[in-house]
Image (cartoon, helix red, strand yellow):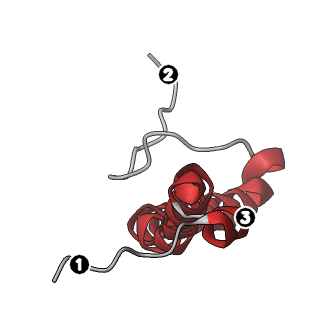
Amino acid sequence: MSEKRESRRLGRYFRLPERLRWIFWPSLTVSGGGSAYLLWLEGEALALAECAPVAALPGMAALIYWFNHHVFASTRPRRDDLARAPSPRKPPS
């Protein structure tokens, strides 16, 4: 066995070939930036999930007010009804 084996150093289980070694730092930069971006988006999603119900309250109040105004409009007397209303009776004395 005259083959000379390269001694392995600890922590170098996979070593890129010489022509691909340049790709290590760009890939590390892009993957780290991507992780930070995903964490930022996750934080934004959590903030959106917490703030969206509070932001929806005025809209829901407007819908309820609109519903109340249009559905129960028939319970208010109209001007024609008030004009034709008989005069109130005097209580018997």
Q: Which quadrant does the C terminus fall into?
A: bottom left
Q: Amino acid at mark 2?
A: Ser
Q: Residues within 10 Å of mark 1 (few under 14, many from 20)?
A: few
Q: Identify the secondary structure beneath mark 1.
A: loop
Instruction: Residue 23: give x, y in percent of width and height.
Output: 76, 55
**Residue 78 in sight:** no
Instruction: Residue 59: give x, y in percent of width and height.
Output: 57, 67
**Residue at label 2?**
2
* Residue 72 position (above or below residue 47): above
Outermost bottom residue: 93
Outermost right residue: 19
Task: Tell me which residue sits at (46%, 70%) in the image.
Answer: 57
**Residue at label 1?**
91
Q: Amino acid at mark 1?
A: Pro
User: Horizontal placement of 46 versus 58: left or right?
Assistant: left
Q: Residues within 10 Å of mark 3 (few under 14, many from 20)?
A: few
Task: Tell me which residue sits at (43%, 40%) in the image.
Answer: 13
Q: Identify the secondary structure beneath mark 3.
A: helix
Outermost front residue: 93
Residues at discs 1 and 3 in contact (Cβ within 8 Å): no
**Residue at label 3?**
80
Task: Tell me which residue sits at (64%, 62%) in the image.
Answer: 81
* Residue 66 position (above or below residue 4): below
Q: Identify the secondary structure beneath mark 2.
A: loop
